[in-house]
Image: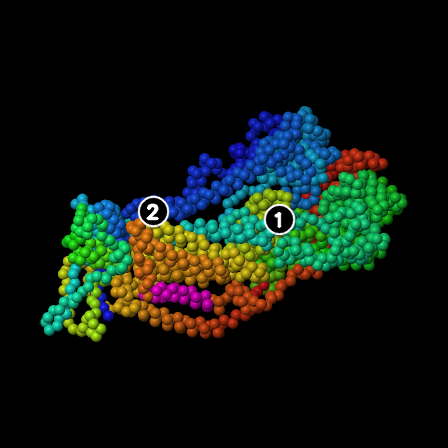
Amino acid sequence: SNVFMYYGLSNFYQNHRRYVKSRDDSQLNGDNSSLLNPSKECEPYRTNEDKPIAPCGAIANSMFNDTLELYRIDNDTRTPITLIKKGIAWWTDKNVKFRNPTGDGNNLTALFQGTTKPVNWPKPVYMLDSEPDNNGFINEDFIVWMRTAALPTFRKLYRLIERKNNFQPTLQAGKYSLDIAYNYPVHSFDGRKRMILSTISWMGGKNPFLGIAYITVGSICFFLGVVLLFIHHKYGNRNTSADIPN
Amino acid sequence: MERCAARRAPEEERRVRANAREYNEKFQYASNCIKTSKYNIVTFLPVNLFEQFQEVANTYFLFLLILQLIPQISSLSWFTTIVPLVLVLTITAVKDATDDYFRHKSDNQVNNRQSQVLIGGVLRQEQWMNVRVGDIIKLENNQFVAQADLLLLSSSEPHGLCYIETAELDGETNMKVRQAIPVTAELGDTSQLARFDGEVICEPPNNKLDKFGGTLYWKENKYALSNQNMLLRGCVLRNTEWCFGLVIFAGPDTKLMQNSGRTKFKRTSIDRLMNTLVLWIFGFLVCMGVILAIGNAIWEHEVGVCFQIYLPWDEGVHSAFFSGFLSFWSYIIILNTVVPISLYVSVEVIRLGHSYFINWDKKMYCAKRRTPAEARTTTLNEELGQVEYIFSDKTGTLTQNIMVFSKCSVNGHSYGERQMPEPGDVQDVLGHKAELGERPEPVDFSFNPLADPRFQFWDPSLLEAVKLGDLHVHEFFRLLSLCHTVMSEEKSEGELLYKAQSPDEGALVTAARNFGFVFRSRTPKTITVHELGQAITYQLLAILDFNNIRKRMSVIVRSPEGKIRLYCKGADTILLERLHPINQDLSSITTDHLNEYAGEGLRTLVLAYKDLEESYYKDWSERLHRAGSAPEAREDHLARLYDEVEHDMMLLGATAIEDKLQQGVPETIAILTLANIKIWVLTGDKQETAVNIGYSCKMLTDDMTEVFVVTGHTVLEVREELRKAREKMMDASRSVCNGFSYQEKLSSKLTSVLEAIAGEYALVINGHSLAHALEADMEVEFLETACACKAVICCRVTPLQKAQVVELVKKYKKAVTLAIGDGANDVSMIKTAHIGVGISGQEGIQAVLASDYSFSQFKFLQRLLLVHGRWSYLRMCKFLCYFFYKNFAFTMVHFWFGFFCGFSAQCTTSTSSHCTTSSTRRCLCSLWVSLTRLLLPRAKGRCPCPQDVPEQRSMEYPKLYEPGQLNLLFNKREFFICIAQGIYTSILMFFIPYGVFADATRDDGAQLADYQSFAVTVATSLVIVVSVQIGLDTGFWTAINHFFIWGSLAAYFAILFTMHSDGLFRMFPNQFRFVGNAQNTLAQPTVWLTIALTAVVCIVPVVAFRFLKLDLKPELSDTVRYTQLVRKKQKTQHRCMRHAGRAGSRRSGYAFSHQEGFGELIMSGKNMRLSSLALSSFAPRPSTSWIDTLRKKKGCEGSSAGSPSGAADKTLRV
């Protein structure tokens, strides 16, 4: 089946209160007034040089912007693996929650007129991707980032590797190399970056915790059941009303 | 209660001038106007808000609200606090407003009641509130002297006499006589009264019901005034057409109100415990806040500083320390749910609901009086399940105050046997079903036109004996019709009205009347009786009056044939000794009958007669006359003469009068005793009466090892008597378990030793002794003695003493007390006890007004306590446990999350119900949560079966009541168990999803561990776990339980999906940013597997623990429930206690509620109308001193009742 490629960050507090609230969903939903006048929650990434930031807030500002590329090394030839960047976000996020501003025409540059890029970003939001349905606020990398993680160590889906034919594994055994364009500093806060490749079952990715927990709890319950049954047989001879004192 | 008049300095003496309002006004005496309302339209809002913010809970909310308005701190939107706050404030305000409206209404009603006041020489209908001190008001027969304490000026009766009943005031049932002082007694009409301008100088208002001292100055003369001239508020005018009185004390100054004690705000022990716990939890909250704040400071210092490239500090925050300080407040806000402020609201709602249960209980509705039970206070319900001591009034509460002639023994033949209808069947639904049953027809008295239609007798053989002309029976009834002090009144031909000064005598004379010996009329020297239709006039030669020592009364009459005969009736102990020896056989048979009667709790009297020789009588009456006019030792001489003539009498028979108990009293007392509730009877009535009632309602039984009677007059005597009682009990118990040494038990171990007394004892204590026993240095001794006894009866106690006794038990026993009574004399104890119950549906409403619960029959008490009280307590405890458990489970999740989100006060995870990032949702959710909180526990068994065991079982197994008394179901230990369970749940609730989510991905490859999914998972598993938990707590599943539990789950999901829907997001993108979350998350198998795992891990230990407890240490209720399941179809045997007649060895003395002095009153003719006097051919014997005698005797009777009179004791100890 398909192989999923993740980037993982650790010691990154995407669940910090001030971080979580620092966004303007109205702006991200394409509301034109919020676009030019973002919510106060976005402070201090609300405006830059008197221009409203789009997308505003600390979450957007800290978007992961390393680029990962995977190559298969076959007899010293590097074959790039096709990484699909669409279909990694929730359908509802992509279609409901995130929308580009509306206006005359589809020219994102024009639509984002009057705003400025987030401080840390190298390029503005309307230049995230070349494809128009993956650009601006509806860029899927952006959407995935904006779905903040619950825990300080997390992974986020980066790319899909589609299976080409049914007779070969998606990624054949062999040597691969990973090229990373390092843009995203994590050293200052002692962060770590990871790249994870995983396949998926009906239960999601590999997750031993649940299995172990089920086996443990199951055995405990069984054991407890036996013990209780024993106790019940030995002591549980509750008699009828004879026991009731009057 | 506030009164119109402002508080004044204490009065030294009171001056009142009749018919002079201006003069009296300058003293500013309290007026009759009462004001209990608190607000008017203008002041309502500010005053009410001010009052409400004095409540800690509301202030706390306000404080949180203010905190949330600070953006750096605000971790939740201010919505979350303001909505519940406004809700609570509004509901309370509406409730207060309605309460006050009704108070206004009842004030108006009371103030506008009409009374007849003499103003400017004319009688005017005047409103109560306008009655002033110094006014003269007119009262009519059977009217309550309700407004004020009056000085009797004149009445319709001769000599300004006036009869009153004081049952409301002191519980005594006999009629009392009051007389106006002679000068005012002549002021018969309004014009004379209008000119009356006497001035009264008297004592200031006090609470002594039996004392009054003052002087009337009128026309240059001084007249002493005593209690004999006073009509106190709360008495009822009887047998007196009308009377006029001068208002001396009004409103709050009246003796009744002075006695009623202060109204205290009652709280339940659970309330107090709750307050303590809330304080503790608050401390815990601050601790958590501090821990997290320190964590925050460290984190910001170590990690946050470095993380600033992505997340800079807020403006104004320059140091980690300050950040920690801010996060402390943020966490206070977030974790505030752990201090359960909504608890108070929920508790109130549950109590309110339960009060309606009580109000709507059909089994506590008395059809006869058309009065349902009423919970007048809604805040005390659960305490009903913890009662340990019941203090009961006697008259009107235990008894109906109706005397019924029920049996008699004539010449060795007992009449009156019948199949007793089971009085007050427990299953009796409408209160009178039992009376219908298989009852034989009452005897038909239609042959006798003068019969009293209300009289009922069940044994036709007695009437047959009368008709057959049985001489003994004739003589028996003749005696009853002659030997008494009843006055008759014949309004029209054949319509006789007896004015009996005690209901016993009334019953006897009425019995004679119905059997054809009708007492028709009397003059000072004659008695006219219709004997089987034939009018016969007897000459009344002498009345040998009743007194407490003689315990008998006699009359000497001369029949038309000229024979002189003495008729005597009296206490068996006295009379049987005075019989002629030839009566021995008869006397032993009669004694058997008497034992039998006494065994049934009837009051008995023995009747005897004696023929007197003409010569002997002449000689005797000569001596009597001399003795009567002797200047000194008159009493002694008379007593000796009486003694002499009442000798060698012939026994006629015995009567048995039933002091009718209220329905089901013995059964109720028996069941309550089984439930380990101790019952004390506090009555103003005489010792004999009280003891008799004690026997008839099975409080005292002959199985008791001993009944101690304390009647000491001095401190030393009382102390000695108490000490003796204790020693006896101790000796007995020592012989059972010869462990303790004598010294030991007098030491501090007194309590424990006395608690373990073997054998059953009872204590009867008199008002005088009680006064000493209640003194500071003896009260503990008294209490220990009393508590070691199974039954305690206090007689001749004043209203205030009643309250003192209750207070004493409250103070030292730390037990929940309940006082039940019906009259104004019970008001003080009703107010003092933890729970006051008023018997409603009778004349007076004072007790009901002061009470917390009211119903019309004593027997409903068992239902109130054993069923409603028990359920209330149970439910409240379960609710509190569950509530604390749930709050901790929900809130502690935030705490754990704090360690993983940089202590940033990011409100966790349990988003959907408690806090979310979206404010609107949050408040809606908190609304939902509070709603479920309100409804769930209520649902825990609403209407039909809200119980662990059904109501019949609660009554059948009174022991089920015990956990409440011992306070087992909710105490600090239980609380900590709940908290521990809550914390345990919260740990699992957080760390299991944490473990799962750390590495998990969705089945479409996307990340699972995003904040929103995590939140939904945790919240859903929380909701499911607490729902399962409440399911486990539910003992009894009904449709309503199902509805609420499933309903709340359904509501949760409905709200969740609505909140996460597209539509709401489109409208408010910033508020509903969880869009699409629910369906995306809950579609994941992993999530459900996590939820299932969490639920199982949280619940399994609980289930296992309960299983073990059920197997190894089942509680009684479990056993009962189990038994019921097993033997659903088998009928459990009814324990029968109603035929537990006692072997019977104790007999009652002479008509107890009798008072001496009336004989002389009759002989003097003073209380007879001129018209009837004119008929008399005899000149009234000059006796100016009769009223003095009456007073004097009354005075010493009070004390003689208290003396350790051997006779009284003997009767008790036999």
| Residue B145 placement: quadrant | top right
The disc labelled 2 sits on which kind of residue? Trp
User: Is B901 contained in the magenta span?
Assistant: no
Compared across the picture, whether A65 is left or right of B901 comes to left
Q: Quadrant of the C terminus of chain B?
A: bottom right
The answer to whether any part of residue B1038 appears in the image is yes
Whole-Å distance between the Cαs marked 1 and 2?
51 Å
Residue interval drawn in magenta: B1086-1108
- Residue neighbourhood size for the residue with mark 1, other residues' Cα within 10 Å, grouped as few (<14), some (14–19), many (≥20): few
Q: Are marks 1 and 2 on the same chain?
A: yes
* Residue of label 2: B78
User: Is B1093 contained in the magenta span?
Assistant: yes
Mark before the other along the chain sequence, 1 or 2? 2
Q: Indicate the position of residue B1170 as horizontal and vertical percent values.
A: 79, 34
Residue at x-position 68% and y-position 30% = B223
Residue at x-position 62% and y-position 45% = B823
Q: Which mark is residue B254?
A: none
* Residue of label 1: B370
Q: Along the line of sight, which residue is nearer the eye, B617 or B723?
A: B617
Q: Along the line of sight, which residue is nearer the eye, B129 or B768?
A: B129
